[in-house]
Image (cartoon, helix red, strand yellow):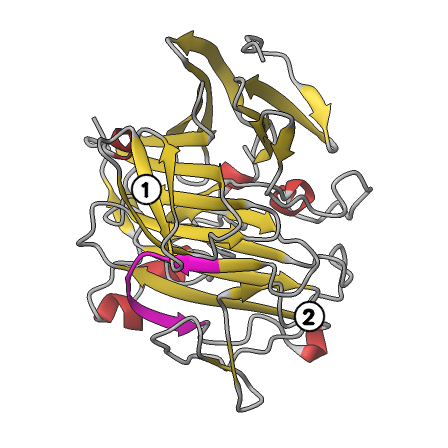
Amino acid sequence: MNPVFTHDTRTVCGQASWHLATSSVEAYLTQQGGHLGPILFHFGDRTIAPYALCPWAEEDTDEELPPVLKVLRGDFFCMPFGANDEVFQGENHPPHGETANSLWKFESMRQVGDTVTLQTSLDNSVRPGHVDKWISLCSGHHAVYVRHLISGMKGPMSLGHHAMLKFPDTPGSGVVTTSPFLYAQTAPQPIELPENQGYSLLEPGTSFSSLADVPTITGQSTDLRRYPARKGYEDLVMLVSDPSVDFAWTAVTFPGEGYVWLALKDPLVLKQTVFWLSNGGRHYPPWNGRHTGVMGLEEVTSFFHYGLLQSVESNFLADQGHATCFHLDIAAPMDVRYIMAVAEIPEDFDRVETISTGLDEGAVLLKSTSGTEVSVRLDLTFLRSD
């Protein structure tokens, strides 16, 4: 597939979107909110489309609905990450920030060697500053390289990526694993309440050491490694990544579908991972019980999903030495990098056990619990800021 070089948008699933492609990957970036999706990974005659798209994407929705929820798809950059229901020092940020809601501006589409890059930008207004976004695809790599550069901004800030996968309907069809984490906990309060037409199942404010054994309000435990699960509930947990590793990762293996999805990050920049387990637990518009089998695998530096105020003020994660925000400096722009990839797997590949560097930094090696190994071409050096 030849690269596309145009500043024009096309309407895709209800949103004006820019298109970029190589023979390996095809991606769309929405102008509204900068949501990256759909993303199509091409393997010969087979195309894998792992990302979620909200069921109401082409419906007329309430005018009061934040743009982030009207667009809701794929992956998007949040700054500040979280609901932002409370004002912070006079700043009234929308849910997940202007970066997930406002109109992005086209800057360029160009090819250097085998890599096609779309650059867009956004001028932040609630807190003045500038954000540049680069989406890069490299021929032969079934990967998407995403970079955000935050400049001209100062003060404390939470931020993160909000990738969302759509799982096959079969219960437990996906197997979730991560690199080592130092601490894990369910959300301090239920994320949904029956009186608000929403339901959550996990025991709030409970720490756990294994994804396989997480307490619920029934007194029993549940296994977060397998999804879809817990139909009719909406839940959220946070894992604190081990900062000592060269790179941290999150992976979902789909044995029945014959592929694995993975995301790589620098744990010194994106310090936590949020799992948003959305399986039909919201019965108010526009959700109406139909947002099912979706899991957010969100790489962040934030205090859960609450927003800037809660991430900046004293909280138990920060008190334990796990930073939940950054302090931006006008003199030093902040560089946030993130890689998402897909690989085909053989039948005996059951779940990702480890991800390590291959023979060089041009690939990573995925090893399954069963011992099967798969090499994935990608550029690990991308995660390091220049």
Secondary element type, mark 2: loop
Q: Amino acid at mark 1?
A: Leu
Q: Secondary structure at mark 1?
A: strand
Label count reads 2
- Most distant residue in the right direction: 60
Quarter of the view holding residue 115: top left
Contact between marks 2 and 1 (CB within 8 A): the answer is no
Which of these two is toward me, 175 or 330?
Answer: 175
> Between residues 203 and 172, which one lies in front from this camera angle?
172
**What residue is rendered at 60% in x and 64% in y?**
172
Which mark is drawn over residue 54?
A: none
* Comparing labels 2 and 1, the label whose residue is closer to the camera: 1
Q: Is residue 314 visible?
A: no
Q: Quadrant of residue 198?
A: bottom right
Q: Residue at x 77, y 46 (%)?
A: 56
Q: In the rendering, which numbered label is found on residue 231?
A: 2
Q: Residues within 10 Å of mark 2 (few under 14, many from 20)?
A: some
Give the farthest residue toward the bottom: 219
Q: As shown in the figure, which amino acid type bears the numbered disc 2?
A: Lys
> Residue drawn 23% across and 48% down?
268
Circle 1 sits on which residue?
365
Q: Position of residue 166 (x, y in %)?
A: 63, 50
Q: Quadrant of the C terminus?
A: top left
Q: Main secondary structure of the magenta part?
A: strand
Q: Which residues are magenta?
A: 176-186
How many residues crowd around disc 1 within 10 Å: few (fewer than 14), some, or many (20 or more)? some
Foreground pick, 29 / 129: 29
Above or below, 320 relative to 112 = below
Name which residue lies at 44% across and 78% down.
213
Quadrant location, the N terminus: top right
Image location of residue 289, percent across then percent down: 76, 63
Report if residue 297 lies within the magenta region: no
